[in-house]
Amino acid sequence: MNNDSNLNLSTELQHGISVDDIKGLQVLVLPENFNSVSDKESLIEASDSLNISKIFKEEGIKCANAFDLGLDVPALERRGSDIWLGQIFIIDNVALPLVINVLTAFIQDKISKKSKKNANVAPERKVHLELKMHKNGNINKLKYHGDSKTLLKVLQNLKNDD
């Protein structure tokens, strides 16, 4: 990474995390309010975020979550049907296709489990995600709060654009 790239990347990092802390990583799975609060005590980690970071690691993606980065963030388990993925920051675009595949499979799995439980009246599950991609020294952002089917299409388009 060049200095301009490090500068853009460092503006996205907060809460004591530096560019040196994330060297060698491909993806960060951060609390959903990582960039919107200034104190570490107010950070919120969704349980779906913890699950997706485990899956990323199992798939061989060099990934870190808040705990791995030294942040003591309580996990929030929501009981509703929505999927809360927090902030997923793709630092290394080489990992983008695999990250998209894992996200797609995770969301599809969550949708199918919910629709099997409530086959009669299953409301469309909403997905809450902030996806950041570090590419060519810039940070591209997608903040999404909407239906899962549309997000799956958006993710597929991101994968195809790369």
Image: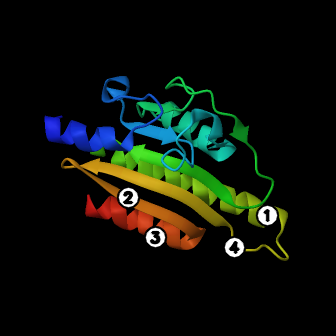
User: Residue at the location (64% across, 43% down)?
Assistant: 44
Q: CA distance from mark 4 to mark 1?
A: 13 Å
Q: Can residue 2 be seen by looking at this rendering?
A: no
User: Residue at the location (83% across, 62% down)?
Assistant: 117
> Which numbered dot is residue 153?
3
Tell me whether circle 3 and circle 1 mark residues in contact (CB < 8 Å).
no
Q: Assign a secondary structure to mark 4.
A: loop
- Per the image, the residue denoted by label 4 is 124
Q: Residue 36: horizontal and vertical position, in percent?
A: 52, 50
Q: Can residue 6 be seen by looking at this rendering?
A: yes
Residue type at the position of mark 2: Lys
Residue 8 appears left or right of 22? left
User: Residue at the location (53% across, 23% down)?
Assistant: 70
Residue type at the position of mark 1: Lys
- Per the image, the residue denoted by label 2 is 141
Q: Assign a secondary structure to mark 1.
A: helix
Residue 3 appears left or right of 25? left
Q: Tell us which disc is closer to us: 2 or 1.
A: 2
Q: Tell us which disc is closer to us: 2 or 4.
A: 2
- Per the image, the residue denoted by label 1 is 116
| The N terminus - image quarter | top left
Q: Residue 105: horizontal and vertical position, in percent?
A: 55, 53
Tell me whether circle 2 and circle 3 mark residues in contact (CB < 8 Å).
no
Tell me whether circle 2 and circle 1 mark residues in contact (CB < 8 Å).
no
User: Residue at the location (57% across, 67% down)?
Assistant: 145
Residue type at the position of mark 3: Lys
Q: Assign a secondary structure to mark 3.
A: helix
